[in-house]
Image: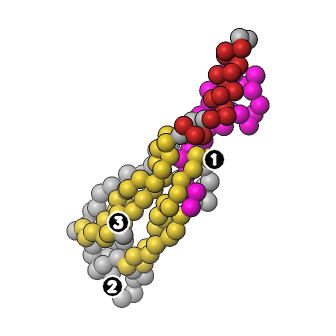
Amino acid sequence: MSPIFLMSLLFGLTFGQAMSFCAPTEYIIHVEKRECAYCLAINTTICAGFCMTRDSNGKKLLLKSALSQDVCTYKDMVYRTVVLPGCPRHTVPYYSYPVAMNCKCGKCNTDYSDCIHETVRTDYCTKPQKSYNV
């Protein structure tokens, strides 16, 4: 192997995280309950962006830990709760959602993140919409 290739490889592994563009991003979620009269559009922040990954073609040459496929995920988050409008008395009108404060590139944690390739489309309402600004 050439020295230039080795230096490039070491540089990429060392400074890969510094070159990532993972940050809190504004996002609108739409929330509704079957029993309630309205859909609520909530402005919040989620973690989104680009994280450096490593090509697994060189897996025989690298340590297993060097082959990580990191995702943009929560570093710090808080939960906020809203009251859904138009709910009858027998229905619990509360909905809690995460707000990203800081993000990082790391392993996807299924305790608080959706780690699948395709997500269910939730950017619409089937009922009259009301806005809620954080």
Q: Name the residue furthest left.
A: 128
Measured in 3D between alpha carbons, the distance from the residue under mark 3 to the one under mark 2, in whole angstroms, is 21 Å
Residue drawn at x 63%, y 29% is 12
Residue drawn at x 33%, y 55% is 123
Mark before the other along the chain sequence, 3 or 1: 3
Say which residue label 1 marks. Answer: 107
Q: Secondary structure at mark 2?
A: loop
| Side (left or right) of 65 relative to 125 | right
Q: Nearer the viewer, mark 2 or mark 1?
A: 1
| Side (left or right) of 39 relative to 15 | left
Q: Amino acid at mark 3?
A: Ile
Q: Name above or below for residue 123 compared with residue 97.
A: above
Residue 78: image location, x then y, percent: 52, 68
Q: Nearer the viewer, mark 3 or mark 2?
A: 3
Along the viewing direction, whichever of 17 and 35 lies nearer the viewer: 17
Magenta region: 53-76
| Mark 2 Cα-neighbour bin, 10 Å: few <14, some 14–19, many ≥20 | few
Q: Name the residue furthest bottom.
A: 89
Using the image, tell me which numbered label, if any, was put on residue 88.
Answer: 2
| Side (left or right) of 63 relative to 132 | right
| Mark 3 Cα-neighbour bin, 10 Å: few <14, some 14–19, many ≥20 | some
| The quadrant where residue 33 appears | bottom left
Q: Amino acid at mark 2?
A: Pro
Q: Secondary structure at mark 1?
A: loop
Q: Answer whether residue 56 is visible to the viewer in this image.
A: no
Along the viewing direction, whichever of 17 and 63 lies nearer the viewer: 17
Residue 2: image location, x then y, percent: 71, 11
Measured in 3D between alpha carbons, the distance from the residue under mark 3 to the one under mark 1, in whole angstroms, is 27 Å
Q: Amino acid at mark 1?
A: Lys
Say which residue label 3 marks. Answer: 42
Taking the magenta stretch, the answer to whether it contains residue 74 is yes
Residue 88: image location, x then y, percent: 33, 85
